[in-house]
Image (cartoon, rainbow, N blue to C red):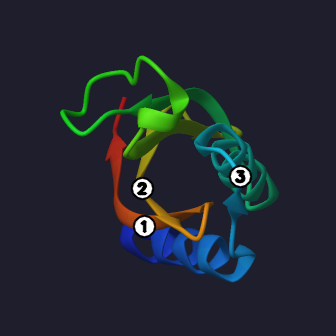
Amino acid sequence: MSYSIEHARVKEAIEKSQCTGPTPLELLHCLENVLRNVGYTPTTSHLLDANVDPAEQPERARFIRIETQKAGEKNTHIFTFAILKSGGIFKALWLQSAVVER
């Protein structure tokens, strides 16, 4: 299966999950759980600020980047989200996905 089709299915699962949280960290945990449920193991997760540097404080995070792997694969799948805040609730907006082939 091509990565674009595979990642489109991941995007669909993320959108159906409607992950939200009172903090960016709880939103990150929800996204990680969805990725686990669709067969990916998160290996590294980052809350990033507006300059795409590691956020010094979780509430200053504007982006989430999650690096994952699938069982039996050496490739790294990277999923990136923008963090939106509405009414005190944080939500994720899918930005992009990528694959580092090894």
Which amino acid, mark 2? Phe
Query: Disc 1 designates what residue?
Result: 94
Distance from Cα at disc 1 to Cα at disc 2: 5 Å
Q: Name the residue rendered at 47%, 32% in the picture.
A: 47
Within-10-Å neighbours for mark 3: few <14, some 14–19, many 20+: some
Q: Residue furthest left?
A: 51
Q: CA distance from mark 3 to mark 1?
A: 18 Å
Please tell me which of labels 3 and 1 falls first in the chain.
3
Q: Residues within 10 Å of mark 1 (few under 14, many from 20)?
A: some
> Considering depth in this image, is 9 or 81 the residue closer to the camera?
81
Looking at the image, is 50 positioned above or below residue 58? below
Q: Amino acid at mark 1?
A: Trp
- Along the line of sight, the residue nearer the viewer: 58 or 40: 58
Q: Which amino acid, mark 3?
A: Pro
In the picture, the disc for residue 81 is 2
- Give the residue drawn at x 69%, y 63%: 20
